Image (spheres, rainbow, N blue to C red):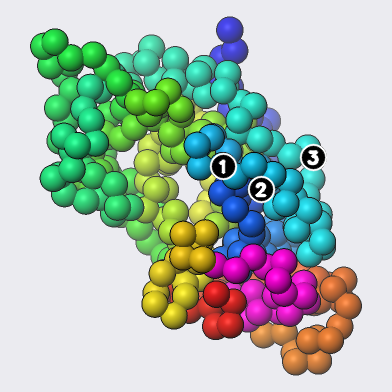
Amino acid sequence: MQSFAPASIAPGSPAPYIGRFAPSPTGALHFGSLVAAVGSYLEARTHGGRWLLRIEDVDAPRSVPDAADGIVATLARFGFEWDGEIVRQSRRTAAYEAALDALKAAGHAYPCACTRRELAHEPLARDGSRRYPGTCRDGLPPGREGRAWRVRAEGVIRFVDAVQGEQVIDLAADAGDYVVRRADGLFAYQLAVVVDDAEAGVTHVVRGADLLDSTARQIHLLGLLGAPVPAYAHLPLATNAAGEKLSKQTLARAIDAHPPQAALLAALRFLGQNPPDALAGAPLAELWRWGRAHWSIAAVPRRRQAVADGFF
């Protein structure tokens, strides 16, 4: 049986920078995805680090056939170069099983019989999920069987985000005990992303601010599993004119509809970088050279979201 084992670093040696981009194959890449990819890629490359590519298809019902291949092809066409083999979560079930077994053995995880309908009137957590009232925390109610697995949420999580600043989250007050394996048998995003980052030795996570509110739970899980906590930077979320996150659900256009140079230039400007107008007609490679030479995470606007003009 596979056991969970986070990547380790020899005592006294500095951790090499390892970043990653982890899109979900729920559709084609849109401008919001490009913003996250550009930010994570340039932050890794300007630190002389590695940049990994992971397809987060753990939620099989939401994955669109052939979307993963389309994402990979689009990234290549835009000039992204990743290190190592592409990781696909759908092939890593054994690793998630091992992590959940470790949480169970340590008494951190417990079975839960509650349904979504039963929790529908509970207060909302920061990320929009329902705050769990602890119904099954001390044992299943009589006559009920466990459907999902939850982790006991305890303590206050503090971290400093490179873009969004200091974050302080009381786990129990915010979301309560959270799901790590769903009632349908699929592993929850929170567990999968933590296991993947830990085993890959990811040192820096640069992604969209829509995931900022999940970070405390991921830091909590990393601690329970004995894995190092990476540094975080959550980039402003690209929205449409109505303030809605660009996504398949809000009919965001695929970036394939735009020339790579124009879309990349727009992404850099959205992220607070200031490429000169003269680069508008430059070859793609030249635009990337400028990005590597001038990228600054400090220049990224410190806000949760912004309208992506012209890229809906």
Tell which circle, 2 or 3, labels the residue nearer the N-terminal end.
Answer: 2
Residue in view at x 57 percent, y 56 percent: 206
Q: Nearer the viewer, residue 179 or 145?
A: 145
Amino acid at circle 3: Gly
Q: Which mark is residue 63?
A: 1
| Residue 198 vertical placement versus 40 (above, below) | above
Q: Is residue 306 left or right of residue 112?
A: right
Which region shows up in magenta?
A: 252-273
Q: Nearer the viewer, residue 184 or 307?
A: 184
Q: Is residue 138 left or right of residue 48?
A: left
| Residue 158 vertical placement versus 235 (above, below) | above
Q: Residue 95 is drawn in which quadrant?
A: top right
Q: Residues within 10 Å of mark 3 (few under 14, many from 20)?
A: few
Q: Residue tagged by mark 2?
A: 67
Q: Nearer the viewer, residue 135 or 98?
A: 135
Whether pointer 2 and pointer 1 mark residues with C-beta atoms closer than 8 Å, the reply is yes
Secondary structure of the residue carrying numbered label 1: loop
Q: Residues within 10 Å of mark 2 (few under 14, many from 20)?
A: some
* Magenta-colored stretch includes residue 261: yes
Q: Residue tagged by mark 3?
A: 84
